[in-house]
Structure formats: structure tokens, C-alpha cells
């Protein structure tokens, strides 16, 4: 089985929250790959800014490329101009149509897996063609605990900092899709994959609802082992591309 993880990372100037999340996510995925069965491979595709305004992500990617990767792990950077990066569906659609994976995980950068994650994807997710999401995942008890984790590198992890939660639907960072379905695109040829005004920064991520409703088959909930979500107080959508605060609701 090949799993491809598609994730976005953008830090408005002066903010490093998402770069710190990326480092935790990537290191966790590497560890999962190193401990996975021999017939499982993992590819991570990071959608990022191409114009040199996100130094925090550049620094993290440089460190990750200096690592010794497991034999069954690969990591790729996909630079996009702001007008394409700042609408999440655009990058997801681009990579989904080009994937050769058996399963695609449409992730957000503040999620990371541990333990037998890849084994459970191989055994329980691969057999489904449509949209799959986990029965449970773990989230920080408070935003302050998440902020503390991001401020302490290397990875600072305490199980007791997290609580288990049950999603009622496949939310944006917890969407697993079979490769055949993914190659049909992610809201392809809709308004959700049209470039946006980069001056306004990252848009609110509402495309997951539209994507879920666009699929012909119902979503399936299965047991996927140990996925965690980092809670944090800074949200990129609350800032424009210059790093100026635009309000807690962000741009639509």
C-alpha cells in the first residue's frame, strides 16, 4: 500500500505556528514509516508558498531534508503562488489528480499520527474506495497545552495532555480517500479551485463540506489508530499575507 499525505503549510510573517506543526507532523510520519510493515510506503506532499515570504516553513523543510529518511518514506515540496495556496481546495485538487497512491490523506498540518497508524490504514482504510474518517482522534485538552508543545522542540509529547473525541463527520484534516476516487479531483472545475486574491491571505477552509457532499457514496467511519490534533491560539486565516491581523473570522 502507498499512502500519500497532502498538507498545507503557510506562516504569515512573524508567525511560526504552522511551521512548528509541520515539523511535528513530518517527524511523526517518519517514525510511523520506519516502524511500518515492509509493504507500506508513505509520501508526504507539502504545499507551501513559492515567493520567499514564509521563512519559517523554509527553515523547517531544510531541517527535514537533512534527516535520514526511512527507506519507505519520501517528502516533496509543492510551491504555489499565494492566489493558489490560500484556497486549500486548489492544492488538494492539483495533487489528488496526480497521485499514484492507494490511499490519500487530506490532512491539515496540525494533525500527527503515532503508533500503529500505518498498519490500521493498510488494514482498514485501503479496502474502501470513497471517503473514510476515523472513529476517534485525540486533541489537546486546552489551547495552552498545544501552544506549549509547539514552543518546545524536539517534539514535546504527553499523552495526558490530550483527550479522546469522536467526530460526527469527516472534518477537513481527517479525510482519507481511495486513490481511484482521489484521482477524479477535489472539487475540480468549481469555484473552489479558482485562484483567490493573495492580498487577503489564507481563506477559511470550508471546502471539505462541499467535497464530502459532492461524492456519490456515503462517508465511512473506521478505527484508525492514534491520530492527534494540536490546538493552538494563532490561526493563519486571521492574518493577511503581510502578517497583519484581520479578525478572528478571517476571509471567506
Image (tube, rainbow, N blue to C red):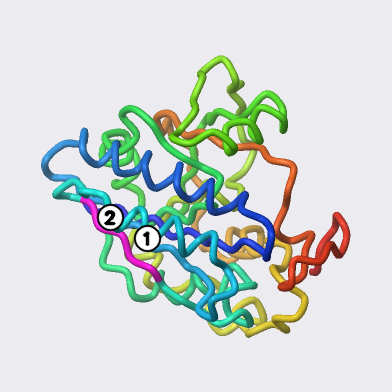
The percent coordinates of residue 73 (x first, y second) are 23, 52
User: What label does residue 62 carry, if any?
Assistant: 1
Residue 181 occupies quadrant: bottom left
Quarter of the rendering containing residue 201: bottom right
Q: CB atoms at circles 2 and 1 under 8 Å apart?
A: yes
Q: Which residues are magenta?
A: 73-77
75 falls in the magenta region: yes
Q: Nearer the viewer, residue 51 or 117?
A: 51
| Observer-nearest of 66 and 199 | 66
Residue 77 or 125: which is nearer the viewer?
A: 77
Most distant residue in the left direction: 38
| Inter-mark Cα distance, 2 to 1 | 6 Å
Please indicate whether residue 216 sits to the left or right of residue 36 in the image: right
Q: Is residue 206 magenta?
A: no
Image point (70%, 81%), residue name:
198
Question: In the image, which disc is placed on residue 66?
Answer: 2
Helix, strand or loop at mark 1: helix
Q: Quadrant of the C terminus?
A: bottom right
Residue at x 85%, y 54% (from the top left corner): 248
| x and y, in percent, of residue 174 in the image | 52, 46
Q: Which mark is residue 170?
A: none
Residue 167, image x, y percentages: 62, 35
Q: At numbered mark 2, what does the secondary structure look like: helix, strand or loop?
A: loop
Amino acid at each position: 500500500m502507498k499512502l500519500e499525505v497532502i498538507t498545507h503549510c503557510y506562516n504569515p510573517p512573524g508567525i511560526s505556528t504552522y511551521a512548528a506543526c509541520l515539523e511535528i507532523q513530518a517527524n511523526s510520519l517518519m517514525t510511523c514509516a520506519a516502524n511500518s510493515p515492509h509493504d507500506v510506503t508513505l509520501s508526504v506532499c507539502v504545499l507551501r508558498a513559492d515567493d520567499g515570504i514564509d521563512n519559517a516553513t523554509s527553515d523547517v523543510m531544510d531541517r527535514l531534508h537533512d534527516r535520514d529518511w526511512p527507506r519507505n518514506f519520501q517528502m516533496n515540496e509543492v510551491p504555489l503562488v499565494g492566489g493558489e495556496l490560500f484556497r486549500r481546495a486548489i492544492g488538494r485538487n492539483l495533487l489528488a489528480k496526480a497521485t499514484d497512491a492507494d490511499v490519500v490523506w487530506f490532512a491539515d498540518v496540525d494533525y500527527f499520527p503515532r503508533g500503529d497508524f500505518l498498519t490500521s490504514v493498510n488494514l482498514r482504510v485501503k479496502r474502501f474506495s470513497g471517503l473514510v474518517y476515523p472513529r476517534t482522534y485525540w486533541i489537546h485538552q486546552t489551547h495552552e497545552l498545544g501552544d506549549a508543545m509547539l514552543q518546545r522542540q524536539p517534539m514535546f509529547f504527553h499523552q495526558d495532555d490530550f483527550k479522546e473525541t469522536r467526530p460526527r463527520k469527516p472534518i477537513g484534516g481527517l479525510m482519507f480517500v481511495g486513490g481511484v476516487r482521489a484521482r477524479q479531483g477535489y472539487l475540480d472545475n468549481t469555484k473552489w479551485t479558482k485562484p483567490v486574491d493573495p492580498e487577503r491571505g489564507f481563506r477559511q477552509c470550508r471546502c471539505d463540506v462541499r467535497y464530502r457532499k459532492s461524492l456519490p457514496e456515503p462517508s465511512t467511519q473506521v478505527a484508525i489508530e492514534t491520530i492527534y490534533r494540536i490546538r493552538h491560539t494563532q490561526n493563519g486565516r486571521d492574518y493577511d499575507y503581510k502578517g497583519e491581523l484581520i479578525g478572528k473570522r478571517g476571509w471567506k
